[in-house]
Amino acid sequence: MLALRLTRGAHPAVQLRRVLVALASAGTGFLLLCALGYAMSHAENPSGSALRLAWCLTPLAATVHLAVAVARTDPATKPRPGLSAIGLGPSRLMTISAMTTALSCTLGSLLALLLFLQLRGDLTGLPFDGAASAFLAADQPLPLPASLTLLALVPAISSVTVALVLAPRYARPTAARTAARGYGRFGAYGRSVARETFGTYGRFGAHRRGTGHRPAAAAPPSEGHPASSEPAPVTATPDSDPTQPAAPHSAPAGLPWGISVLTVGLAVQAYAGSTSAVPGLALPGGLTSGTPAVVAGWALTALGLALAGPGLTHLCGRLLQAARPGALRLLAGRVLMEEATRIGRPLGVVSAAASGAFAMTALYQTSSPSLGPLTTVGTFLVTGCTVATLLTTAVEAKHARADTTAALLRLGAPTTMLRGAAALRAGTLLALFGPLTLIVAELAALPLAR
């Protein structure tokens, strides 16, 4: 009930992002139901039905990626001071976020079921003169358990993934911190620290000290308890946000792995395209037959781009600060380095989706390919989810550096410089990822066009 209240009272921009998750869930659920309908109408071809179901994994992964990005930017489930006092700690907020994601995806699955039943003619007459009956099995009764199982995949996987990503993570206490915590528990100095780190003063103690509020003075040490020279133990408040990792100051470790996986994927595609000994797969949507090694090579290429995205973003930040940078280039480069992990991975996924969409056109025999309806839906769904995830991550990054932006404005930085730094960051990323996407797409399409 609390998740429903938070969903209803959210900002229109937050509601728009949730609607996008529902639409993506509806598209993925519709593709899964279409794969079920094809399996029912083509019982003599189980391999083709299994292949169509496997092709739905890409829209499913794109939908889950978007749902996680939307859940991370949801302001209703962000830890705030005082929420732990009423039982809304990080664990409970993580549960609410997972339930909100499941609610949006379930709504999308219901829309997919209604659309599927409408096209089958189960609600009204058969639309489009029965043109969709070939892959919807309109002449057969729809198995309800199988349909509900397929429709439950997107809400279940999305909510579980959100719960795993947003789960609170606390650092294990070291021996020195445990000893200090034990002394603070039984000593007068410990009582002073406990008062300092409880409630709102633990989070905003610096501001309160500036306004004249002083903590209670520690009691003088007795003869049996001498004063300790150890510093005060740092107690992590339960209201802190554990889902926002600190931006790395060094290069992310995934760049060598991403380049290696990308190279292996391109090599596998080149080797598979040069030999014809392996039998091909009849790909759905009017695509020509391709070997399983080609499909595996493309998957490795997409994974390599996703892994190399944070490292390439960090590299862009370093290049902007090279050769005596000014204030504009220094600010843009530092922001790219700080947000390399947050922005780089969605950028890599978008690059992988764009290169895959370009390479997919090489699988058609004709020079002017005509995509089928389901292939068109899947292509637009994957592309839209990846782009929406990138934009959502950009919004999250903007909110994360809101305090830094406010501090720069208080110091007298003009707004034109901040906008110029944002434009410079976008242009630098486009200048690197654009040609990289085209090069990878060309190399991936060479063995497929033979």
Image: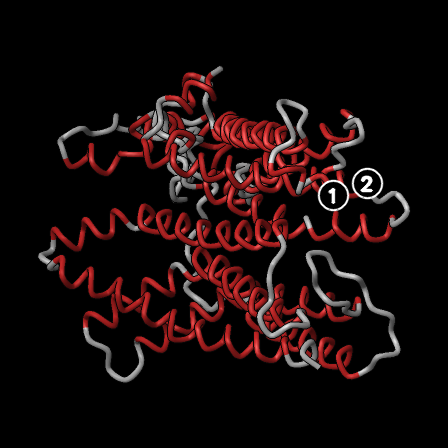
Horizontal and vertical percent for residue 333? 31, 69
**Residue 304 pos. (x, y %):** 61, 68
Relative to 412, say whether 360 is above or below.
below
Residue drawn at x 42%, y 27% is 187
Q: Which of 149/116 is in front?
A: 116
- Quarter of the figure that contains the C terminus: bottom right
- Give 28 or 432, whichever is nearer the viewer: 28
Neighbour tally class for label 2: few under 14, some 14-19, many 20 plus, Cα within 10 Å: some
Give the total number of marks visible in the rendering.
2
What residue would you read off at disc 2?
A: 41
Q: Residue at x 38, y 32 (%)?
A: 15
- Name the amino acid, label 1: Ala
Within the image, what quadrant is residue 441 found in?
Answer: bottom right
Q: Coloring scheme of the render?
A: secondary structure
Task: Kindly identify the amino acid type of the residue bearing the numbered disc 2.
Answer: Ser
User: Residue sitting at 77 percent across and 43 percent down?
Assistant: 38
Q: Is residue 206 left or right of residue 127?
A: left
Q: Is residue 170 visible?
A: no
Residue 46 shown left or right of residue 24 in the figure: right
* Residue placed under numbered mark 1 in the picture: 134
Distance between mark 1 and mark 2 Cα atoms: 7 Å
**Disc 1 and disc 2 in contact, CB within 8 angstroms:** yes
In this rendering, would 292 be left or right of 366? Answer: right
Q: In the structure shown, which secondary structural element does the residue marked by tag 2 occupy? A: helix
